[in-house]
Image (spheres, rainbow, N blue to C red):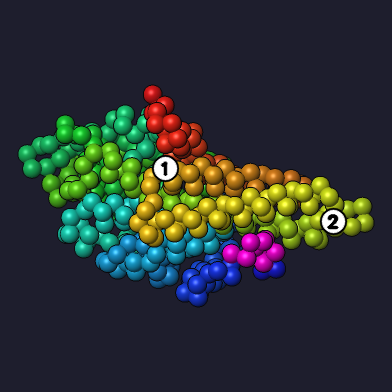
Amino acid sequence: MTDALDRLDLLELDADLEEENRLLRDTVRKFADDRLRPNIRDWFEAGELPARELAEEFGALGVLGMHLEGYGCSGASSTQYGIVCAEIEAVDSGLRSLVSVQGSLAMYAIRAFGSEEQRQRWLPPMAAGRALGCFGLTEPDAGSDPGSMRTYARRDGEDWILHGSKMWITNGSVADVAVVWARTDDGVQGFLVERGTAGFTTTDVHHKLSLRASVTSQLSFDDVRLPSDAVLPSAEGLRAALSCLTEARFGIVWGVTGAARDALAATLDYAGTRTQFGRPIAGFQLTQRKLAELAVSLGQSQLVARRLGQLKDSGRIRPHQVSFGKFANVKAALEICREARSILGGSGITTEYPVLRHAVNLETVFTYEGTHEVHTLVLGAQLTGLDAYR
C-alpha cells in the first residue's frame, strides 16, 4: 500500500520528518509488516494473542516504555513514541494497547510513583518484555467515576489487606505485576500486586466483538495480604492514577491515526481496482467525495497528534489538551473507518480487508481511558470554568 500511503499524505507531513524519526518509523513499520500483519487476521478471528511472546519482540525492538528515562528505557521523545503507536495501531488497536498499557500505564506508574527498589526490580525486565504489567483502576461498577471504586485496602500491622475487583484490564491474566488502585482510610493509594500472590486471581473476558487480538481480564482480590513495600510510595490520591491515564491517552491520540490511515489506504487501493459500470469505482463522483472528506479528516487528525507531540516534548502539555486529542482523533478515526467500509461494499464486512476490524476496535477505544462523553465534559469545563460531571 506504499502508493496509497503516499497519495494520502496530502499535506506532505512525511517530508518534515527528521531523519531519525523516519528511520524509527520505517523500522517499526517493517516489523509490523513482517511479524504482525501476516498474523493479525488469525489472532483476531481466534480471539487470541501470544502476548508474552510479542512482548519480548517489542522489547527487543525497544518500544516498551521507550519514552521513559533510565532503567533500560531509551528516553525517546514523546513524538517518537507517538510515531511508534501509529505504526503499531495501523495493524491493530489491540497490539497498540499491549504496548501502551505496558509502557504508559504500568511502567509509567512505577517510574513516576515507585520507590527506587521497585523501579530497579521491575522496569528493566518490563522494558525488555521479559515481564508484563497491567493497570487496575476500572471496576465493574466504577468506570467513568473511579472515585467511587469499591476495592479497599486496610492496614494489618506492617502489611496491607486488599479486597475487591477490577474489570476490563488489558494484559491482566498474563501480567507479572498489576498496578492496583484502592481506597484506604487515608484516600486512594497505588499498590503493586505480583502474579501468584495468595488470593489474587484473574479471569479472561471472552466472546468480545472488539479488541479480539488483546488479552482482557477481570482481576479479583480476596483479602490479599501485601507487604508494606508493595505500596507505590508517591502514589497518593486519585490524581496519581489519573495522571497515568493522561500519559496513556497521548499514545491513543497518535495510534488511532494509524488505524484510520491503514483503513483508508486499503479502501483507496480497493476503489482503484473494483470495476462497476465499466470503470473503477474510484472514478465516480460520490466515491471521490467520500475519499476526499476522509483524507482531509485523516490529515487533520495527524496535525492534532503532531501538535500535541510538540507540546509534550516541550513540557507544556496539559490534560485538557490530551482530552482534545482523544475527543477529536478517536471520533474522526471511527468515522473514517465506518465510511470507508461503505466504499468496499460487501467485501468490507470480511476480515480480508482491515477496515471493519479497525472500526470495531475503535468502538472500544472510543470508550476506554475516558469515554467520549467524559472528554466532552473535560473540554466543556475548560471552556466555561464550570464542572458538569455531577
Q: Locate residue 62 relative to residue 238 in the image: left or right.
A: right
> Is the C-beta separation of discs 1 and 2 under 8 Å?
no
Residue at left 42%, top 42%? 320
**Where is the C terminus found, in terms of image quarters?**
top left
Residue at left 50%, top 72%? 18
**Where is the N terminus found, in terms of image quarters?**
bottom right
Magenta range: 5-13
Look at the picture and state if 28 lies above or below 367: below
**Could you tell which of marks 1 and 2 lies nearer the N-terminus?**
2
Please say whether residue 118 is visible from this viewpoint.
yes
Residue 172 image point, x, y percent: 37, 48
As drawn, the residue found furthest toward the right would be 278
Residue 322 image point, x, y percent: 43, 47
Q: Residues within 10 Å of mark 2 (few under 14, many from 20)?
A: few
Magenta-drawn stretch contains 6: yes
Mark 2 sits on what residue? 283
Please say whether residue 125 is visible from this viewpoint.
no
Q: CA distance from mark 1 to mark 2?
A: 42 Å
Residue at left 13%, top 46%? 228
Image quarter for residue 282? bottom right
